[in-house]
Image (cartoon, rainbow, N blue to C red):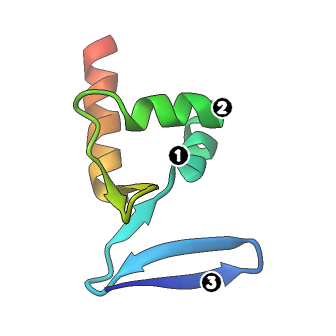
Amino acid sequence: MITFRNEDAMNYEIIDQDGIECLSPLEVSKLLKVSKTEAYNIFHSDGFPSFRLGEKKLRVIKKDFITWLKNQKGETA
């Protein structure tokens, strides 16, 4: 079961029943300071740990995103 926690009027965090925080493509685009289109490209790239909620909504578990990001840093260094 997935619930939404409202942190402020404009910002929703997606939390599942186990307290796992998930990020949307828009949130990832803001974190990486890239366009929303580029974030969607990342979500569809090989090796990115994204999943779908229903038919359309893409998400990534925040912990998995951080691990993926650290691995990307290692590949380009």
Location of the C terminus (image quadrant): top left
Camera-side residue of 55 and 18? 55
Camera-side residue of 42 and 57? 57
Indicate which disc residue 28 carries.
1
Q: Which of marks 3 and 2 is nearer the N terminus?
A: 3
Q: Distance between the residues labelled 1 and 2?
A: 9 Å
Indicate which disc residue 44 carries.
none
Q: What residue is shown with label 2? A: 35
Indicate which disc residue 6 carries.
3
Point 29% across, 37% down: residue? 48
Q: Earlier in the sequence, mark 1 or mark 3?
A: 3
Amino acid type of disc 3? Asn
Q: Distance between the residues labelled 1 and 3?
A: 18 Å
Which residue extends farthest top?
Answer: 77
Q: Helix or strand or loop: what does disc 1 sit on?
A: helix
Q: Earlier in the sequence, mark 1 or mark 2?
A: 1
Q: Is residue 17 above or below residue 48?
A: below
